[in-house]
């Protein structure tokens, strides 16, 4: 069942979304050579709690941190630790904040120092694919119209869509119905209705789509070792233009 949020619930989700997006921007500003991923995670946790919210990811299915920080060939769910960021790395940071009974969920890939033009293009195409997708995030369309637009844009740039992980509804629960694949056929999937709140999150590999799961039980990497990028926002469906609840400052 896909929940439809009331106007009061939407107002609460705006608040959660603002804090989550601010946490993402704050995390992104910390990305520089010499910093460890656990330093970023601790600062993000402090930032979220200072706003009166709770980190959504901490202890979720046993996840041990507040942010997912995935570097270079890590796609998603990287566990923050002692890894020191290097000049030229690309750093995907995913954060969630829970306040007033609702979650915000968003992610972006950041450049550490000076990155290659190829890495920048991967980041740019991944981010733009989200915006191509949400052109269809309104009443009158079906869910996989979004999926298909993301897939078409990404593949037309020679990159691959990760299949095993997908976007999702978000609200009182971090993961709600429906699943939102970043690939699919236009004209299919559930009809979009005002009041749906969706976390749309393309995960894009520079090489092949194949992934491998790391022994830590969380980190997901590309199988071929080529790099990957991630971009996510929490989006409200309306009868007109979609409203991005995790208001992007990047
Ligand atoms: N933001 C991730 C998602 O959209 C959730 C991270 S998994 C967690 O699915 F366990 F770290 F929370
Ligand atoms: Co998500």
Image (tube, rainbow, N blue to C red):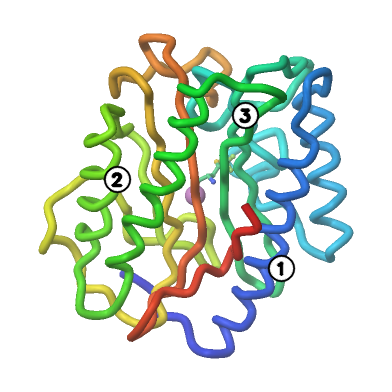
**1 or 2: mark nearer the eye:** 2
Separation (CA) of disc 3 from disc 1: 26 Å
Separation (CA) of disc 1 from disc 2: 28 Å
In terms of sequence position, does the residue under pointer 3 or pointer 1 come before the other? Answer: 3
29 left or right of 78? right
Question: What residue is at 46 percent from the left and 67 percent from the top?
Answer: 235
Label 2 element class: loop
x and y, in percent, of residue 89 in the image: 63, 20
**2 or 3: mark nearer the eye:** 3
Pointer 1: residues within 10 angstroms few (<14), some, or many (20+)? many
Question: What residue is at 62 percent from the left and 29 percent from the top?
Answer: 91
Quadrant assignment for ligand 1: top right
Q: Which mark is residue 30?
A: none
In terms of sequence position, does the residue under pointer 2 or pointer 3 come before the other? Answer: 3
In terms of sequence position, does the residue under pointer 1 or pointer 2 come before the other? Answer: 1
**3 or 1: mark nearer the eye:** 3
Disc count in the image? 3
186 left or right of 176? left
| Disc 2: which residue | 182
Q: Nearer the viewer, residue 165 or 234?
A: 234
- Position above or below: 168 against 5: above
Question: What residue is at 50 percent from the left and 15 percent from the top?
Answer: 214
Question: What residue is at 77 percent from the left and 36 percent from the top?
Answer: 41
Pointer 3: residues within 10 angstroms few (<14), some, or many (20+)? many
| Disc 3: which residue | 91
Which of the 4 image quarters holds residue 51?
Answer: bottom right
227 left or right of 102? left
x and y, in percent, of residue 150 in the image: 29, 48
| Disc 1: which residue | 99
- Position above or below: 111 against 48: above
Farthest bottom residue in view: 7
238 left or right of 156? right
């Amino acid at each position: 069942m896909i929940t439809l949020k009331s106007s009061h619930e939407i107002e609460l989700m705006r608040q959660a979304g603002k804090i989550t997006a601010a946490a993402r921007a704050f995390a992104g500003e910390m990305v520089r050579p010499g910093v460890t991923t656990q330093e970023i995670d601790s600062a993000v946790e402090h930032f979220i709690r200072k706003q009166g919210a709770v980190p959504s990811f901490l202890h979720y299915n046993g996840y041990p941190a507040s942010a997912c920080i995935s570097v270079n060939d890590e796609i998603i769910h990287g566990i923050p630790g002692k890894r020191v960021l290097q000049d030229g790395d690309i750093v995907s940071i995913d954060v969630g904040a829970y306040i007033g009974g609702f979650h915000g969920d968003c992610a972006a890939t950041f450049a550490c120092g000076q990155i290659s033009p190829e890495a920048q293009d991967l980041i740019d195409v991944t981010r733009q694919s989200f915006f191509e997708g949400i052109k269809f995030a309104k009443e009158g369309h079906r869910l996989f119209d979004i999926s298909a637009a993301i897939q078409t844009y990404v593949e037309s740039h020679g990159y691959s869509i990760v299949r095993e992980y997908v976007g999702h509804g978000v609200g009182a629960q971090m993961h709600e119905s429906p699943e939102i694949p970043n690939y699919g056929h236009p004209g299919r999937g559930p009809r979009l209705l005002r009041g749906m709140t969706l976390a749309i999150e393309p995960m894009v590999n520079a090489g092949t789509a194949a992934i491998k799961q790391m022994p830590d039980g969380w980190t997901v990497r590309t199988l071929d070792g080529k790099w990957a990028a991630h971009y996510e926002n929490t989006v409200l469906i309306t009868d007109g233009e979609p409203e991005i609840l995790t208001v992007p400052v990047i």
